[in-house]
């Protein structure tokens, strides 16, 4: 019988603390008609990020991401480049308080 007591009163854990984040983006340039929304949705689903993306009448694309901060940052980087055929001129990023209000990532239509 093993009577050795561990030095720790608890077992070590591999659980990593995650930070939730919400980012609201406006992407300008040649970003409509180049599959920007569909590629953004595909990448968001790949990383498990929720929210939406939609075209705006002025030619920009508006995006809202909610998820793990590291994943949201990866998606912001994707938006800075866009899919093949896009020419991103600018990305305005506004960090907001995480709300967890979305269950999926959707393409919106204006």
Image (spheres, grey):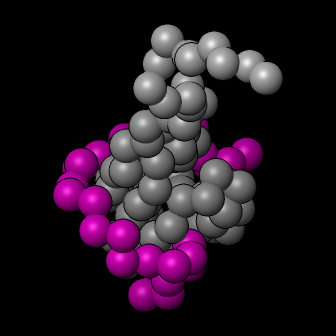
Kindly give the residue lying farthest to the right in the view shown: 1
The quadrant in which the C terminus is found is bottom left
The number of callouts visible is 0
User: Can residue 36 be seen?
Assistant: no
Taking the spot 64% from the left edge, 52% from the top edge, the residue there is 47
**Which range is magenta?**
81-110
Residue 37 colored in magenta in the image: no
| Image location of residue 14, percent across then percent down | 59, 30
| Image location of residue 23, percent across then percent down | 33, 53
Please tell me in which quadrant of the rendered image residue 46 appears.
bottom right
User: Can residue 19 be seen?
Assistant: yes
| Image location of residue 65, percent across then percent down | 43, 60
Please tell me in which quadrant of the rendered image residue 25 appears.
bottom left
| Image location of residue 22, percent across then percent down | 33, 56
Please tell me in which quadrant of the rendered image residue 35 appears.
bottom right
Kindly give the residue lying farthest to the front in the view shown: 1
Q: Is residue 102 above or below residue 8?
A: below
Left or right? Give the position of 57 relative to 79.
left
**Nearer the observer, 91 or 52:** 52
Left or right? Give the position of 27 relative to 46.
left
Q: Is residue 89 above or below residue 53?
A: above
Taking the spot 46% from the left edge, 56% from the top edge, the residue there is 67
Taking the spot 21% from the left edge, 55% from the top edge, the residue there is 96
Left or right? Give the position of 51 relative to 45.
left
Taking the spot 56% from the left edge, 16% from the top edge, the residue there is 6
The quadrant in which the N terminus is found is top right
Residue 101 colored in magenta in the image: yes
């Amino acid at each position: 019988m093993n009577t050795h007591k561990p030095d720790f009163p608890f077992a070590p854990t591999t659980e990593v603390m995650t930070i939730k984040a919400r980012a609201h983006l406006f992407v300008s340039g040649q970003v409509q008609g180049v599959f920007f929304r569909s590629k953004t949705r595909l990448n968001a689903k790949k990383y498990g990020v929720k929210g939406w993306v939609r075209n705006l009448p002025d030619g920009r694309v508006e995006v809202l991401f909610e998820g793990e901060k590291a994943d949201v940052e990866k998606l912001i980087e994707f938006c800075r480049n866009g899919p093949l055929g896009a020419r991103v001129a600018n990305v305005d990023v506004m960090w907001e308080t995480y709300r967890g209000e979305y269950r999926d990532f959707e393409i919106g239509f204006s």
